[in-house]
Image (cartoon, rainbow, N blue to C red):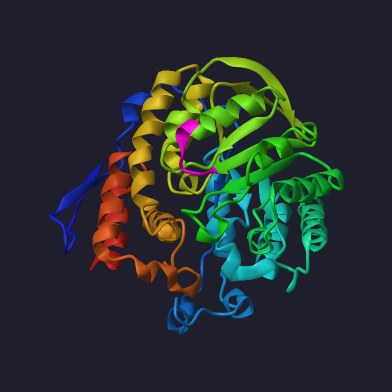
Amino acid sequence: MKCPVRATELDPFEIRDDVWEARAQGLGDATSDRLTYAAAHVVMDARYAEVDHGPDCPGSASDIAEHIDWDATLDVRRSLVDQGLGIAEAMDTAQRFEIGWAGAHELIRRTGEAGLDFVAGAGTDHVNTLSGASDVVDAVVQQVQEVHRCGGHAVLLPVPQLIEMGIDEAGFVDVYTNIIDQCDGPLIVHWLGEAFMPALAGYFPGNAFTTIMAHDPETVRGAKLSLLDAERERELRQRLAEHDQIMLTGDDFNFGSLMTDSAIVTKHVPFGDRQVPLGEFSHALLGILAAIGAPANLALRAMADGRDDDAAVILKSCERLGRLIFEPPTPLYKAGIAFLSYVNGTQDVFDLPNHLQRQRDRTWYARVLKSASECGVIEDAESAAERALYVLG
């Protein structure tokens, strides 16, 4: 179906919900055995629209938590699981630094109680003051243990305070190896680039990252790279493969290419209670997956049916949407993900902590909608057009 949309700052255009119908013919319901975790956002309740929070007057974590619609937030996660995706919980997409550990812990707890397949970020944000490296170790270990208690696997979030403390290469290695030695696996090490958080410039100095990853591969099963550097990811992916470790791409610009570099599986390796394929391709732990549930599901089904060329076409077409949603200022990408969740009817209120969505203009939202239509994200064109006009005016 095609449905016209009028956008004030753009010429009228049509959105579609039939982009991949031909490629879907004959596909079964099974999805690929790749690890594909979608980093999901939080949904605010209708009352929050009247709360005076914003970039210049951000709300406290406790004030924001009062207005999180927990049921709607969990519905977002269930919709992603219905598309064959796992959940990456309490990550940057959920505005981890705005909602704090109390909000993050509630997300982790609820996702675990719902029985969803998930990984979750473990950091230090339950501690007000970190006096030194040993405090960092203790804090991260405590959150890892809580993630495991709730039924998830832990992602070791970057700790900006290590940069502030002036920790050098050897110090980074000591911090991470001490964390690893006190935790059960599988663990995922997260390398977040400065495009997402400028305070992380210089993270993992020297060869710290590869040294850490080689320390205990049976516990550290993989890494999530969010550097927006495809060639660097490919290089590090080869190094991890030498230890049977998994690369989960966090590259929201090049994920399609990185996930489909090769269809050849060289072996299967353990990740928790699963055996997952290893080869010259990346698995995925991505914010953009939360925006492209329908085409991602189709691509995973195509992989399961051995139609890898179809999967590559679908995922690479979604890269254009990823580049748009994650264009600078990159931290505003959550607005695009929440917008598409809203126009697809997964949530009824379009709002984010500190009203982050207000920092993007109507022209940008119209471009996102048009790009989403072109890569098969829209599930019901008529309903999406009606909802989009509420935002576009």
Give the residue drawn at x 36%, y 27%.
313
Image quadrant in which you'd find residue 273: top right
* Rendering coords of residue 76 (x, y %): 53, 55
User: Which of these two is toward me, 5 or 258?
Assistant: 258
* Rendering coords of residue 304 (x, y %): 53, 22
- Residue 256 magenta-highlighted: no
- Is the residue 24 above or below the residue 297 in the image? above
Q: Is residue 379 visible?
A: no
Give the residue drawn at x 59%, y 31%.
236
* Rendering coords of residue 210 (x, y %): 67, 35
Give the residue drawn at x 81%, y 55%.
141
161 relative position to 144: left or right:
left
127 relative position to 28: left or right:
right
Direction left: furthest residue: 11
* Rendering coords of residue 136 (x, y %): 77, 60
In the image, which residues are magenta?
226-231
- Is the residue 271 above or below the residue 95 in the image? above
58 relative position to 33: left or right:
left
Q: How many marks?
A: 0
Give the residue drawn at x 69%, y 65%.
106
Q: Quadrant of the C terminus?
A: bottom left
136 relative position to 363: left or right:
right
User: Which of these two is toward me, 5 or 146?
Assistant: 146
Q: Is residue 234 visible?
A: yes
